[in-house]
Image (tube, helix red, strand yellow):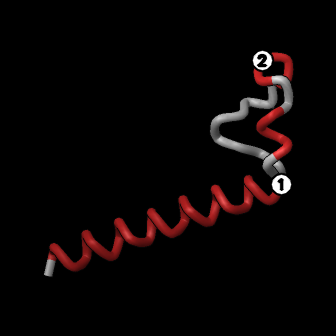
């Protein structure tokens, strides 16, 4: 029973994490960007 509860909690955390990353991507944010376009030349914003 404890294994199932742990698995459900981990799945919930993963789902929330994915949802947060999708929302950030829609807003133009990226994990790898950091919004320092002087560093990357703005290439990360071309893909958004």
Residue 48 rendering spot, x and y as whole percentages: 81, 51
Residue 19 rendering spot, x and y as whole percentages: 62, 66
Q: Residues within 10 Å of mark 2 (few under 14, many from 20)?
A: few
Is 24 located above or below residue 12 in the figure? above
Q: How many marks?
A: 2
Q: Nearer the viewer, residue 32 or 43?
A: 43
Residue at image coords 50%, 69%: 15
Residue 16 rendering spot, x and y as whole percentages: 55, 65
Q: Nearer the viewer, residue 9 or 15?
A: 15
* Residue under label 2: 39
Q: Residues within 10 Å of mark 1 (few under 14, many from 20)?
A: few
13 to the left or right of 40:
left
Residue at image coords 84%, 41%: 45
Residue 43 rendering spot, x and y as whole percentages: 81, 34
Label 2 element class: helix
Label 1 element class: loop
Q: Quadrant of residue 33?
A: top right
Sequence order check: which comes first, mark 2 or mark 1?
Answer: 1
In front of the other: label 2 or label 1?
2
Which numbered circle lies on residue 27?
1
Is 32 located above or below residue 18 in the figure? above
């Amino acid at each position: 029973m404890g294994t199932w509860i742990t698995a459900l909690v981990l799945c919930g955390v993963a789902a929330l994490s994915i949802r947060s990353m999708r929302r950030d991507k829609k807003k133009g944010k990226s994990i790898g960007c950091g919004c320092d376009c002087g560093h990357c030349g703005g290439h990360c914003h071309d893909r958004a």
